[in-house]
Amino acid sequence: MIAERDSSGDVDIDARGLKCPWPALRLARAMRDIDNVAIVADDPIAPSEIAALAAENDWTIEEIATQIGNGWRVSR
C-alpha cells in the first residue's frame, strides 16, 4: 500500500493487488485521521466493500480517474 498526502491534503491509497477486505480496512484506517481519501483497488469485490463501508459511516463516495487507475474519492 502506498499512502501519500498531496497538496490538497488528501491521502491517496494504492490498494492494487490487495484482496478484500484489505482495501476497505486501509480506507477505514485513513478516514480515522482525515476527511478525504482517494483509493485505487483492483479486487473485483472492492467496489461493493468500499460502498458498504461508506454507507455505514455516512461518507460520500464518487468514482474518479487517477494516474494509476480508476478509483474512488471518499469524503466525510
Image: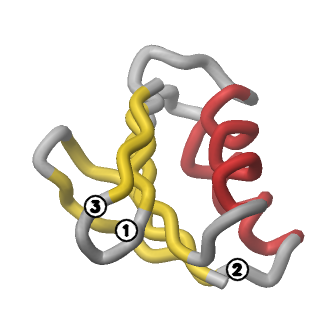
Give the residue displayed 66% in from the left and 38% down from the top.
Answer: 26
Q: Which residue is mark 1?
A: 63
Q: Amino acid at mark 3?
A: Asp
Task: Give the Cα distance between marks 2 and 3.
Answer: 20 Å
Badge nearest the viewer, 3 or 1: 3
Q: Is residue 11 above or below residue 73?
A: above
Q: Which residue is mark 3?
A: 6
Q: Position of residue 41 (x, y in %)?
A: 44, 36
Q: Amino acid at mark 2?
A: Trp
Considering every residue shown, the one lying at the far right of the view is: 56
Q: Please tell me how many numbered marks the rendered image carries.
A: 3
Q: Earlier in the sequence, mark 2 or mark 3?
A: 3
Q: Amino acid at mark 1?
A: Glu
Determine the image quadrant of residue 14.
top left
Dot 2 falls on a residue whose secondary structure is loop
Badge nearest the viewer, 1 or 2: 2
Task: Give the Cα distance between marks 1 and 2.
Answer: 13 Å
Marks 2 and 1: in contact by CB < 8 Å?
no
Q: Which residue is mark 2?
A: 59
Q: Position of residue 38 (x, y in %)?
A: 41, 59
